[in-house]
């Protein structure tokens, strides 16, 4: 009985206590939405978070009650939906066998399993990201607005979840049109993609215009502080938001002015210390692609094996998949977010967390790599096996 009570308390604590500071901000923004106070992390931060995930949280809590349990269950269901989306994307790009393998890898990939219950925006973001990639894959086969527009919508929703995805839609549209050798239908499809993307972001931009007293803010006013976090004299390539005095030198400033203040300090530091900025970029790349967790608390043998081994396995298979996909233009176009995010985080802080949000795309390519490697090994095995009857008849 005592054990059951302890387990019950542990489950309650897990269900009701967020693990990350970011989670608290999302919950605060959702609370403001539910109580008719608009999207605000606090009274001084009205444009501090993108709206999609707080809206998701607010909707779940309005429908199923307050607390974290409805949010965790909702995110877990999103994680399940992500497996289906990965299957559909794999089938669209490569075929049924590759899709089944990719879906299996997604279901078993430890970080994605854990991520689905952490009350962070990544799971919702990944669902939109993979859905957008799926529509781009369909548009590649049939270049028309009926597929381009939904792709743009999904890219827009992904950006409304994580603002750093902003440039992916334009890059994908350009890559799509160029990859299709400039066909008229391809340009029209790319235009519909960009149009739907812009239309999806428009209400948020209009809201920010009003909230910032007439300033153009496409994503959030967290960009300035985030840039300074990655480019300052104490920066080491990793997160350090809690080590910076954000009130220093910003007394009396508006939210917009504070963001500009920290942005200008970061740019000034970068212009005065180009060598250190380059060194930091290398460090951030190392943190982004690190096989083992960057946090010292997770550097034990068990976490390194649990998280590092599956990541290494997927990356090796993704490398094989890329080699055999080199003539599959749409597959390469859909890996643009991976390259883009990697470059973005040579400027902003580097973290495994940001890389893992892109892993579903790499897992799809890894599924193709595993099937290709298995097929190759199987064909070599068949060639090495000689039928004794055939051999004797040849003699």
Image (cartoon, helix red, strand yellow):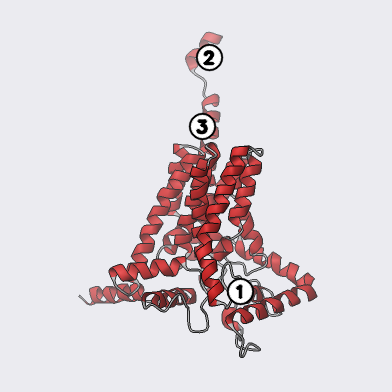
Residue lying furthest bottom in this view?
251
Residue at x 50%, y 44% (from the top left corner): 147
Above or below for 114 versus 92: below
Looking at the rendered structure, the number of numbered marks drawn on it comes to 3
Q: Which tag, 3 or 1, sits closer to the chain's start? A: 1
Residue at x 61%, y 90% (from the top left corner): 252
The answer to whether residue 322 is visible is no
Q: How far apart are marks 1 and 2 (CA)?
A: 81 Å
For discs 1 and 2, the disc positioned in front in the rendered view:
1
Q: Is 39 placed left or right of 11 in the picture?
A: right
Query: Quadrant of residue 219 in the image?
Result: bottom right
Q: Which tag, 3 or 2, sits closer to the chain's start? A: 3
> How far across and how far down the image is residue 88, in percent?
44, 44
Q: Distance between the residues labelled 3 and 2?
A: 21 Å
SS at badge 1: loop
Residue at x 66%, y 43% (from the top left corner): 178
Q: Could you classify mark 3 by the number of other residues whose Cα lies within 10 Å: few (under 14), some (14-19), or many (20 or more)?
A: few
Q: Residue 152 carries which label?
A: none
For discs 3 and 1, the disc positioned in front in the rendered view:
1
Residue at image mark 2: 391
Residue at image mark 1: 215
SS at badge 3: helix
Residue at image mark 3: 378
Q: How far apart are marks 3 and 1 (CA)?
A: 61 Å
């Amino acid at each position: 009985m005592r054990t059951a009570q302890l387990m019950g308390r542990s489950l309650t604590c897990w269900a009701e206590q967020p693990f990350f500071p970011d989670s608290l901000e999302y919950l605060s923004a959702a609370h403001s939405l539910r109580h008719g106070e608009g999207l605000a992390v606090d009274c001084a931060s009205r444009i501090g978070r993108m709206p999609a995930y707080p809206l998701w949280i607010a909707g779940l809590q309005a429908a199923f009650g307050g607390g974290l349990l409805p949010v965790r269950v909702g995110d877990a269901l999103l994680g399940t939906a992500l497996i289906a989306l990965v299957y559909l994307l794999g089938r669209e790009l490569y075929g049924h066998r590759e899709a089944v393998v990719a879906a299996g890898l997604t279901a078993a990939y430890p970080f994605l399993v854990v991520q689905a219950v952490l009350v962070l925006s990544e799971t919702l973001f990944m669902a939109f990201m993979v859905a957008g990639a799926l529509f781009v894959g369909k548009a590649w086969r049939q270049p028309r607005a009926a597929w381009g527009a939904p792709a743009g919508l999904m890219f827009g929703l992904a950006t409304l979840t994580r603002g750093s995805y902003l440039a992916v839609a334009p890059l994908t549209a350009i890559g799509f049109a160029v990859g299709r050798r400039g066909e008229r239908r391809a340009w029209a499809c790319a235009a519909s993609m960009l149009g739907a993307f812009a239309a999806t972001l428009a209400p948020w931009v209009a809201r920010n215009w009003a909230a910032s007293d007439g300033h153009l803010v496409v994503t959030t006013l967290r960009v300035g502080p985030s840039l300074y976090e990655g480019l300052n004299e104490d920066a080491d390539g990793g997160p350090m938001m809690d080590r910076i005095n954000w009130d220093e030198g910003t007394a009396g400033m508006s939210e917009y002015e504070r963001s500009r203040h920290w942005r200008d300090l970061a740019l000034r530091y970068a212009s005065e210390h180009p060598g250190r900025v380059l060194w930091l970029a290398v460090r951030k790349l190392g943190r982004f692609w690190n096989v083992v967790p960057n946090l010292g608390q997770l550097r034990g043998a068990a976490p390194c094996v649990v998280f590092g081994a599956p990541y290494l396995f997927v990356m090796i298979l993704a490398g094989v998949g890329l080699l055999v996909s080199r003539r599959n233009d749409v597959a390469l176009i859909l890996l643009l977010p991976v390259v883009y995010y990697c470059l973005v985080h040579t400027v902003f802080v580097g973290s495994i967390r940001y890389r893992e949000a892109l892993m579903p795309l790499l897992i799809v390519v890894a599924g193709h790599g595993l099937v290709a490697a298995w097929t190759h090994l199987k064909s070599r095995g068949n060639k090495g096996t000689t039928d004794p009857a055939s051999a004797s008849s040849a003699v």
